[in-house]
Amino acid sequence: MRLRFLLASLLLAAPWCIRAANLVVTHIGTPPAAQAAIDHAAGVWGGILESAVDIKVRVLWFPLGGTTLGITFPNGRRDFSGAPLPQTWYASALANSIAGTELNPGESDMDVYLNSGTNWYLVTDGQPATGQHDLVTVALHEMGHGLGFVGLSKKVGGTGSLGLLQMADFAPLTTSFPWPQLDTLPGVFDVFLSDQQDGPLAMMPNPGTQLGGAMTGNQLYFNGPLVLNANGGTGARMYAPGTFALGSSCVHFNESTYPVGNANELMTPFSSTGDANHWPGPLCLAVMQDIGWVLAPDVSVAERSDRDEARVWPNPVNDVLHVELAGIAPGTPLRIMDGTGREVGNMPYAAELFVGGLEPGIYMLVTGPGGAGVRFIRSRR
């Protein structure tokens, strides 16, 4: 039996942290046995990400009704000190990590609703019985959205939009933090979404029918440079069926491309009973890096992310980028990929590279598909 995840697509990026992330979970009505499974999921994410700021997760055990397993509302911030992209929303957990300080004191970073009426498997061993949904898997999925695997897409009639979501769209549910004025602005996740025919969503008239068509054309891809590098030069296909589903479309991987048993199934919109997945998968990890997260040194995706193998500094950078790529000979051609996956420059590998001519934004240095790679941010002056 396959049931739908819903996500309240709200906000969203983050570098240069000093310690493993600490997800602090506050439970509202959650049974003790369920708390253990949810806390286990929080520990998985905590072992993956780095952040100097605690990540505040508010979990509500709530009768959502129907087949909905969970709904997540991420808090968010934009145009904060150190934000890599202006006029762009970041999940507050991500924004806090970038800024190195808490930007939303007294507020949760995400509100996670989990359906109290679901037949949950509460043990953490990943062995649910037929007819049971694995709570660790679902909690990992929902927290992934709260950490930034989320956009601001909406479609009414034939018109699609980014940044026009309202709390009323998810009534009667509410958030514990004030719903922001999204101001028709994209989230950093949205910046990397691209229609195979018409190009990046963030470049389309907003709101508009072109956006609406791209959101339901079934040809939507996440084309971040790290995803492209981890996936052999191909973007990650997104869930964009012909009928728009608020909270599911454009904020999940495509179910048919990454089915049950695929390493990247966790962030698809459906969950199967009797199935468990306790790891985000390589493409999700690459997405997290593309939007700005720093992974712990012992967490690997397709590109080399270990600081002993590939590192750059200062990061963010204004003009001169210092580069170390272990095992790469000086003079080896390097490509510079922008946030949409386009090659915007190339140069021979050297210990110091001049990048002052690049526009502010998120970039990736790569030696080739599957080769060494490292992300850097060209800062605003």
Image: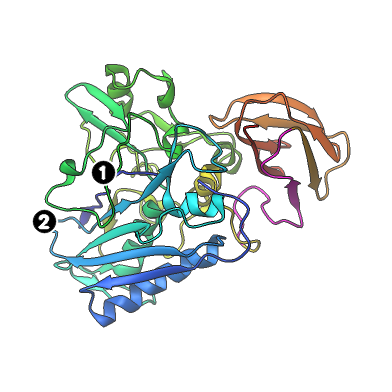
Residue 352: mark: none
Out of 147 and 275, give the one closest to the viewer: 147
Residue 301 highlighted magenta (yes or no): yes
- In the shown orientation, is residue 104 left or right of residue 62? right
- In the shown orientation, is residue 309 left or right of residue 66? right
Quadrant of residue 213 in the image?
A: top left
Out of 204 and 268, give the one closest to the viewer: 204
Q: Earlier along the polypeptide chain: callout 2 or callout 1?
A: 2
User: Magenta region: which residues?
Assistant: 299-318
Percent across and percent down for residue 302 are 61, 49
Percent across and percent down for residue 124 are 37, 76
Name the secondary structure under disc 2.
loop
- Provide the residue designation for mark 2: 66
Out of 145 and 334, give the one closest to the viewer: 145
**Residue at horizontal 65%, vertical 32%?**
381
Q: Main secondary structure of the magenta part?
A: loop
